[in-house]
Amino acid sequence: MAEVINMPRLSDTMEEGTVAKWLKNVGDKIEEGDILAEIETDKATMEFESFHEGTLLHIGIPEGDGAPVDTLLAIIGDEGEDISSLISGTSKTPPPAKEEKTEETSPVEESADSTASSIHEGIEVVKMPRLSDTMEEGTVATWLKKVGDKVEEGDILAEIETDKATMEFESFYSGKLLYIGIQEGESAPVDEVLAIIGPEGTDVDAVLNTKPTAKSASSDGAPEVEVDKSEPKEVAQETKAVEDGQRIFVSPLARKIAEEKGINLKDVKGSGDHGRIVKRDVENFTPAQSVAPEPTANVAAEVSKVSTQPILASGEEHFEEVKNSQMRKVIAKRLSESKFTAPHYYLIIEVDMDNAKASRVQINNLPDTKISFNDMVVKACAMALKKHPQVNTSWKGDTTRFNQHIHVGVAVAVDDGLVVPVLKFTDQLSLTQIGAQVKDLAGRARVKKLTPAEMEGSTFTVSNLGMFGILEFTSIINQPNSAILSVGAIVEKPVVKNGEIVVGSTMKVSLACDHRTVDGATGAQFLQTLRAYLENPVTMLA
């Protein structure tokens, strides 16, 4: 079914965009994550990627032309699909849902314009941004500024969790942060009031009443006044949390450096805004600076923490409910859809890893070379997919899509769940290139620095729990893939070779297949080829 792509809102002030350059032409094949065009906004020229796959059937805005947000930009669908009704319907009359939304919001915008004179110049209402074209709501993971703080253009206001990743959101304005509309951990739809920035002394209630939000429209503005009054209490609680050591404000880069150096962030004094730990604080930190005062403080904090914990009587039931993150909700939704729509079946083999172990030692003895067993598995999968294209497919209902390219996704565990960065054109990469890319992508995944494009477009997935000592397991297919390989640990055990019992190294792998696209014999043949590559690694270097 054809997908209509509208001009995106790439900044919270963007009203229209100009197509600076089209990077795809009508008739081109489009993959998820492909860059469609460069779009010039009121702030900058940005690359706009596709979140759909198919054929580019129509371009609605030519290069050099500008158009308002939500104007038809392009249509992606199946080759030869009739889109005349979409083009005529979109160009003449917007879809009913959007029409209703326009009718509802237009009076608000007109009201805001008509009363703009009552708002002091320099006051800016910042709304929840749409950070991807599939984003419907966002969650404020962390506020990096507090009410009353000075904000400069380019300062990071908050870290916002979308359905794709957690991203830093910067201010496009300068002034004082007067109001926070969405607290840490709370979620809100796109375009909900996120914050207000302006001169000190501004009447925030007047600004909120001038530009009604969904909350004020539904409750006559009363909750807005209530939220504003409770703001000092929220700030006080947040400050106390920092002082008690329960929360540490730290930039993602500083956190990554601290993890690499093994530095406890509780021992680091932040020099950023309101004590936030930044890169220079971690790089300049020496343990000697905090040896004397810190242990006493830490012990006192621990004693205080223990003394305030409720003592539960024997047999007393106790539980705690933790709000699900946006990432966790998306993982749950997608895995449920995969498990309940794709008929899974599983094939398991055991691989002799003696030659793989010896080859890895030889390769890693080369200068500036470092590969893992997982890198060897990824490479073997890519080469096996070339020989068994039926496994490199996607179920499309009426059709099966045979992917001519091979993009292997590698599952990486992160604090909030699981992400799958993708190695593009994996079959064309050497073992050392795979090793370097996996290390880079996994490292950035753990500090939430992957872009949506780096997590999309996989045609096959590898999940490895061998490093945790797991001998054998099965995985849920990462749709729209047709299969996922689960990799266990390498173990030494008695094996029979040439009629004799000797000590050998083996590894079990499990292939989960979508029976709609991959039959049992096809999956078995794929595993035979995979085993041949892993048991004879020299064949992967040819």
Image (cartoon, rainbow, N blue to C red):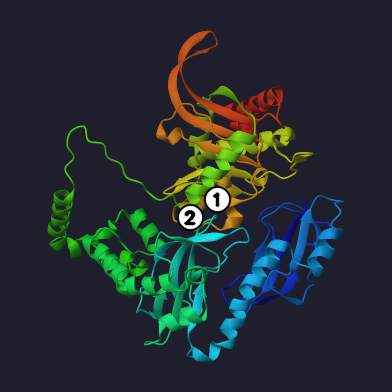
Residue 81 location in percent, x, y? 85, 51
Residue 410 location in percent, x, y? 55, 43
Locate the C terminus by quadrant. top right
| Residue depicted at x 56% and y 58% | 451
Q: Amino acid at mark 1?
A: Gln
* Closer mark to the observer between disc 1 and disc 2: 2
Q: Amino acid at mark 2?
A: Arg
- What residue is shown with label 1? 437
* Residue 532 falls in image quadrant: top right
Q: Nearer the viewer, residue 93 or 341?
A: 93
- What residue is shown with label 2? 444
Q: Is residue 260 left or right of residue 55?
A: left
Q: Is residue 209 left or right of residue 536?
A: left
Whichever of labels 1 and 2 marks the residue nearer the N terminus, that label is 1
User: Could you tell me which secondary element the residue under label 2 belongs to?
Assistant: helix
Residue 139 location in percent, x, y? 47, 60
